Structure formats: C-alpha cells, structure tokens
Amino acid sequence: MAVNQARRQRNPRGQGERLRDDIIDAASRLLEDPAGPPLSLRAVAREVGVAATSVYLHFDDVDSLVRAVASRRFTDLIRAQDAARADLDDPCDRLRAACLMYCEFGLAHPGHYQVTFTNPLPVGDGVSWEQMPGQKAWEHFVEGVAPCIGRTPDDPEAARTALLLWQQLHGTVSLRISRPRFPWPPLAETVADAVSRLTAPAATPTNPRPQDPAHAPAAT
C-alpha cells in the first residue's frame, strides 16, 4: 500500500477532532487488507502524514484505535442496511434486504469484517455491554427481526431468532471469504432461504405419527 508522503498541514485551533477523524480513516485503510501487517500507531501516523506524537494525543494505544475503527464500521453497516430496505414495506422483505446487505458489506470489506466480527474486540473486562462497539448494531438487527416474526423487540424470541440468523449470516460471510473457490449458490438466494427458514413458525404436523402398538396405552 502506498504511504502518504505529503506532510499534513497543521489543523487550525479547535479542529483537533478533524485530525482524530483523519487518523481513524487512515487506520481503516490500513486494516482493509486482512493479510496486511499488524496495525501500529507509527504506520497510521505515516499514512496521515503527521508525527507519531500527534496520534498519541487522540489514542493511547492500538487497541483504542481499533475500537474506534470498529465503531465507525458498525455505524456504516447500520446506515447501509437502512438504505437497502428504505423502499420496502413488508417487514420480512426489509429483514431479507438488511441481511443481504450484511453479507455484501462483509464480503466487500473482508479486512474490516475481520476487525468487527472475526477477531476478538480489544475491550477490557470492565467494559459493559452498553459500551461495546456493535451493541447498537445488534439492537438494530433485533428490531428488524421482531416485526418479521410478529414479536416486539423486547420479546426474548426476537433476540433468539436474531441470534440464530446472525450465526447463519456470519458463517455465510466467513466461509465465502475463506473458501472463495467453492461453488457457492447465489448470495441473495442463500440469504433469502436462511431468513425464510429461521423466521417461519414451527410446523405442526397435521397427521400425528402413528403410535407404536407396543407402547400404546392399555385399553380400559
């Protein structure tokens, strides 16, 4: 990857947040390649065109920068899913569109998918669930699943179905990244089938299985 050799102009007073955004953008570019070298703050500084000390003013270490990149990519994913289903009314059609976008997003950005969903997120033990990068993306997903199965987002069944569906989608993305030469079926078809199977109500057999006479209750 080409390194940005041009020395970055100093931000005017009060525009330190702009430098922080530039640092996150640079780290995102470096993490785009899943086979790239491990991220370092010095490499990010070279990419931005600033001294390494400028990066340390905004991020204490690599882990804090990776968390910032993950948070931004989770936000990007939510926006992409919202855009994909914006013109749809049926809740299950909306869910299928969001699930397909999840897969397309991951396959288009394998390095970022590795950061957000494959590698352990670098968070300490003291970080609560509400502070986790991706917590809002999870809630957003549950909110999309709930109306498709006729539940409310706070219904445990909505979270249970969302978890099963997420596991299916994650497997779809991960396998297609690691086994690109396998003859996979069309992505949209795979996602639609997964959503239909996991959101359909459990089938109730119309003709109960005949009972084994040996275990039939004795006649009275």
Image: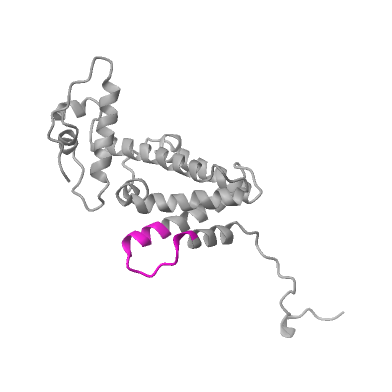
**As drawn, 15 above or below 210:** above
Judged left or right of residue 134, residue 218 is: right
Magenta segment: does it hold 183? yes
> Residue 44: horizontal and vertical position, in percent?
19, 36
Q: In which quarter of the view is residue 40 placed?
A: top left
Q: Nearer the viewer, residue 42 or 77?
A: 77
> Residue 78: horizontal and vertical position, in percent?
46, 41
Q: What residue lies at 71% left-to-right and 70% top-to-bottom?
A: 205
Magenta segment: does it hold 216? no
> Residue 6: horizontal and vertical position, in percent?
13, 31
Judged left or right of residue 190, residue 113 is: left
Q: Quadrant of the C terminus?
A: bottom right
Q: What residue lies at 16% left-to-right and 38% top-to-bottom?
A: 43
Q: In which quarter of the view is residue 127 placed?
A: top left
Q: Residue furthest front?
A: 87
Instruction: Specify the segment rendered in magenta.
Output: 172-188
Q: What residue lies at 44% left-to-right and 38% top-to-bottom?
A: 129
